[in-house]
């Protein structure tokens, strides 16, 4: 049989598609799918489509919202092995997208009502999902440069770009009360954008998730790479910022749909969590983390890890636990943990293990081990640069990393409140000068002063001091530092290097040992989506904050408790959920930890220090600021409750910290 006679029946079947409906159309689609699959499998010559056939298959693909869509994608992908077919299909899809976007952009230009602007929303999702599948197929084939160029032109179509710009303006202008009603109309277009953005910026996850980098974090401003921001990156940032509320609604729904499957990394909305986690709500991040961890455990359970039976003495909980846990192989850490305290009978139904985690997490800060040093207010801890006095300190830090990782892996809570910079090392996020405030307020203020004032005649050299058993030793930050002066031209680099020395290089071995143990259980990619303050909540849980106790232990400066701004503040805190209250406490005190004796036992750098609220003038839409070493909130005298709400929420949830480089 000739090639042409083979093509004819399949062409006729395709052209019959519009004449069938419902189950009959489904059967015909399945038949065509089977034929094209066999042609591909047996490497038979592919059917050459004509423009009428292309229109038939593409129209059915775009109009159907049931399982036939998947079959149709399958048919078209099979037919696309033929380059001529591929060009015809892409041409049709490109013209279709241009027609739809032109209609929508015209509606924007006419200033139509919100609910009249959008048409063909579900159809667009279909076509973009197919474009993604076809792009993946082309990606497997290295000799299809022309087709790739066509796709690039499609994604950079000016009508499509204008649609995204119109969408950004809509999200910026639309009143919050109308957003929920219009979410079903707007969401499909947002999803279309993220499908495109994923094509342009694919997510690449480390396949070998168990072997993670164990390097200390870098410093903001170091290794500055000037990267040209591409157009889609710019649009991505603007859509994320303007559509934050709606996007979190969409992510929440998608996580619910995917709770059994995981794999958000392959979903169009997954790109938001991986590329811009800052705009994602903590609740969504937490759900994503648990979902991905569940998938990780399902993979690990295939290996049937045994139980970890641990017996220890309460008074020697650190060393007994160290000797048992340190002997385990990395894969054995994933087994179920059963704890028994020496001399105490009973079955561990979970309560003993919970108690063990909490007791051990407090004991790691025992000064007798010399592993950690407290922050100025004594509530947070940083690896000590003197821990080397303990010969096994590096082994202990790896053990502690294992314990923290195991707690996250098993869903247990700890009583470990680390400094901001140490959390950033765990998350692989850049350090800032502001992170120095937790460690040494005097040095932080000195660095700030160097940046803000003229240092020409100060006589500062590129050196730093180390306390070596009570004796200060001067060391060079860079080679020749003892003779190199800090000048106006090099002071920013000096401050960066000095702070990095204190927060990272001095404790490099300790941090990397900790990370080595931590990543045996938890991949960095899984926690890097969190902010440092969210990581504290993941490890320590959401605190129960007694607002009445807080009220009774507040010092007002410039305000009194009857002031309208203070009344609004308490009303706002009453309306906050637990995570927002925790964020407020972190903003003011540097940690979400509530002392056992309540807020009257809060400590500052000079001893007991209640929360202070200082009045400041309201100038230029200023945000509230804080000084965590003094548990101090500087609160502008806002003229309206709504302004206070917006500014406070922005400060505690997204606010930038401290000062940076010009």
Image (spheres, rainbow, N blue to C red):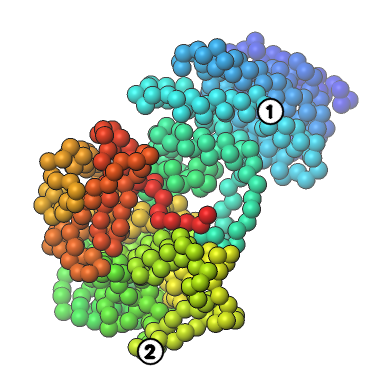
The answer to which of marks 1 and 2 sits earlier in the sequence is 1
Count of numbered tags = 2
Dot 1 crowding, Cα within 10 Å, few <14, some 14–19, many 20+: some
Q: Which residue is mark 2?
A: 471
Q: Which label is found at residue 157?
A: 1
Q: Is residue 283 above or below residue 530?
A: above
Q: Is residue 17 above or below residue 620?
A: above
Residue drawn at (76%, 30%) of the image: 86
Can see residue 10? yes
In the image, 50 versus 540, the foreground residue is 540
Q: Is residue 101 above or below residue 411?
A: above
Q: Quadrant of the image for the N terminus?
A: top right
Dot 2 crowding, Cα within 10 Å, few <14, some 14–19, many 20+: few
Q: Position of residue 349 (x, y in %)?
A: 22, 62
Q: Position of residue 180 (x, y in %)?
A: 37, 25
Q: Position of residue 239 (x, y in %)?
A: 51, 34
Q: Is residue 405 above or below residue 317?
A: above
Mark pair 1, 2: CA separation: 67 Å
Residue drawn at (33%, 58%) of the image: 536
Residue drawn at (46%, 69%) of the image: 499
Q: Secondary structure under badge 2?
A: strand
Q: Position of residue 57 (x, y in %)?
A: 68, 21
Q: Is residue 406 left or right of residue 512?
A: left
């Amino acid at each position: 049989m000739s090639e042409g006679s083979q093509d004819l029946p399949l062409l006729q079947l395709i052209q019959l598609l519009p004449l069938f409906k419902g189950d009959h159309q489904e059967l015909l689609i399945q038949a065509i799918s089977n034929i094209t699959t066999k042609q591909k499998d047996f490497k038979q010559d592919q059917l050459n489509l004509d423009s009428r056939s292309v229109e038939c298959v593409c129209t059915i693909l775009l109009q159907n919202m049931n399982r036939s869509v998947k079959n149709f994608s399958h048919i078209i992908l099979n037919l696309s092995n033929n380059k001529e077919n591929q060009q015809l299909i892409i041409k049709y899809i490109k013209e279709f997208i241009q027609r739809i976007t032109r209609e929508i952009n015209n509606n924007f230009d006419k200033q139509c009502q919100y609910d009249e602007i959008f048409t063909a929303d579900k159809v667009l999702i279909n076509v973009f999902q197919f474009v993604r599948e076809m792009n993946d197929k082309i990606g497997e084939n290295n000799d299809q440069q022309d087709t790739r160029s066509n796709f690039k032109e499609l994604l950079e179509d000016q009508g499509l770009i204008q649609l995204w710009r119109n969408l950004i303006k809509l999200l910026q202008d639309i009143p919050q009360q109308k957003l929920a009603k219009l979410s079903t109309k707007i969401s499909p277009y947002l999803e279309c954008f993220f499908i495109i953005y994923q094509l342009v910026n694919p997510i690449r996850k480390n396949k070998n998730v168990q072997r993670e980098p164990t390097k200390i974090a870098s410093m903001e401003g170091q290794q500055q790479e000037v990267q040209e921001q591409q157009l889609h990156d710019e649009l991505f940032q603007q859509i994320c910022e303007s559509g934050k509320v709606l996007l979190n609604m969409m992510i929440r729904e998608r996580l619910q749909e995917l709770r059994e499957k995981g794999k958000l990394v392959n979903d169009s909305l997954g790109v938001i969590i991986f590329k811009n986690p800052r705009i994602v709500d903590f609740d969504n991040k937490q759900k994503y983390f648990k979902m991905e961890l569940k998938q990780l455990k399902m993979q690990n359970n295939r290996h049937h890890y045994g139980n970890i039976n641990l017996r220890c003495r309460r008074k020697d909980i650190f060393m007994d636990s160290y000797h048992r846990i340190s002997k385990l192989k990395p894969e054995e850490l994933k087994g179920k943990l059963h704890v028994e305290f020496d001399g105490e009978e009973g079955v561990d139904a979970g309560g003993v293990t919970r108690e063990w985690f909490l007791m051990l997490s407090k004991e790691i800060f025992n000064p007798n081990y010399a592993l950690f040093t407290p922050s100025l207010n004594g509530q947070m801890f940083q690896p000590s640069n003197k821990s080397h006095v303990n010969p096994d300190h590096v082994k202990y830090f790896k053990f502690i990393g294992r314990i923290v990782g195991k707690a996250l892996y098993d869903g247990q809570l700890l009583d470990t409140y680390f400094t901001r910079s140490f959390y950033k090392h765990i998350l692989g996020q850049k350090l800032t000068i502001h992170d120095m405030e937790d460690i040494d307020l005097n040095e932080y203020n000195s660095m700030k002063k160097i940046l803000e004032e003229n240092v020409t005649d100060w006589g500062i050299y590129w050196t730093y001091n180390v306390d070596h058993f009570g004796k200060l030793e001067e060391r060079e930050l860079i080679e020749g530092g003892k003779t190199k002066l800090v000048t106006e031209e090099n002071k920013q680099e000096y401050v960066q290097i000095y702070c990095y020395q204190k927060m990272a290089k001095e404790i490099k071995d300790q941090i990397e040992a900790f990370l080595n143990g931590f990543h045996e259980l938890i991949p960095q990619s899984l926690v890097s989506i969190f902010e440092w303050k969210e990581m504290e909540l993941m490890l320590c849980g959401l605190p129960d904050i007694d607002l009445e106790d807080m009220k009774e232990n507040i010092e007002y400066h410039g305000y009194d408790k009857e002031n309208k701004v203070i009344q609004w503040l308490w009303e706002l805190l009453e309306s906050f959920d637990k995570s927002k209250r925790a964020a407020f406490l972190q903003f003011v005190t540097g940690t979400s930890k509530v002392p056992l004796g309540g807020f009257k036992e809060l400590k500052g750098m000079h001893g007991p220090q209640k929360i202070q609220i200082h009045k400041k003038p309201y100038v230029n839409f200023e945000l509230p600021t804080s000084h965590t070493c003094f548990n101090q909130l500087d609160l502008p005298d806002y003229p309206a409750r709504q302004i206070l709400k917006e500014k406070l929420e922005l400060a505690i949830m997204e606010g930038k910290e401290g000062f940076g480089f010009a």
